[in-house]
Image: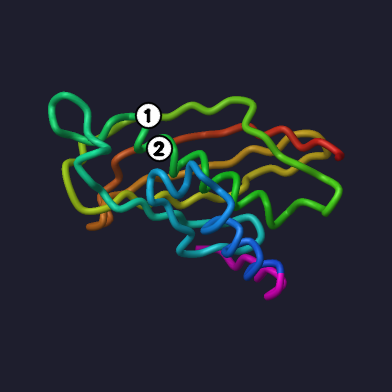
Amino acid sequence: MPEYEELDPRFKASLLNWMKTDNPFWSLLGMEIIGIKKGWAKIRLPFTKKLTNGIGVAHGGAIFSPADSAVGMALIGLTERDESISTLEMKINYLKPLSGGEIIAEAKIVHRGTMTAIGDVEVRDGDGNLIAKGLATYAIVKK
């Protein structure tokens, strides 16, 4: 992994707390940040039966959610206080079914412009097997 700059410790603590207390969707799914730096983030989602589709494997949305969230968290460290971000578009390729363990999404920002950013994300199972690959475009808007 390339070297990514650490977040300011106070900002990082505030962000981690916010994700635990003020993000209902993350709480609903059980997602958590397991690593975050400027331009890079890793999100974990424990696999549970509630994340399965009708054939007992992880629903595509359960894989997509941590992938999108990882890109957002990677980008958060590269934004200013007067900027907000939002997903504009995301493409994901599902490569392998998942029926247990955990979902780990690791994202890096490959381009940060003035109005948009591009993030690359790999989603792996708990054993490190690649299960999905995604590319996201985010909007960057002045508040």
Task: Inspect the magenta stretch and tell me whether residue 52 lies in it.
Answer: no
Q: Nearer the viewer, residue 1 or 121?
A: 121
Image location of residue 63, percent across then percent down: 36, 38
* Residue type at tag 1: Asn
Image height check: is 43 above or below 52? below
Quarter of the image that includes the C terminus:
top right
Element marked by disc 2: strand
Label 1 SS = strand
Q: Is residue 9 magenta?
A: yes
**Residue occupied by mark 1:** 93
Q: Position of residue 103 (x, y in %)?
A: 32, 49
Crowd around label 2: few <14 · some 14–19 · many ≥20 (10 Å) = many
Residue lying at 40% horizontally and 37% vertically, measured from the top left: 133
Q: Name the foreground residue: 99 vs 120.
A: 99
Q: Residue at x 25, y 48 (%)?
A: 47
Q: How many marks?
A: 2
Q: Residues within 10 Å of mark 1 (few under 14, many from 20)?
A: some
Q: Earlier in the sequence, mark 1 or mark 2?
A: 1
Q: Which residues are magenta?
A: 1-10
Q: Which mark is residue 3?
A: none
Query: At 56% from the left edge and 33% from the top edge, which residue is drawn?
Result: 136
Q: Amino acid at mark 2?
A: Lys
Q: Considering only vertical position in the picture, is 77 above or below 113?
A: below
**Mark 2, residue position:** 133
Mark 1 in CB contact with mark 2 (< 8 angstroms) = yes
Q: How is the image coloured?
A: rainbow
Going by the image, does 61 lie left or right of 9?
left
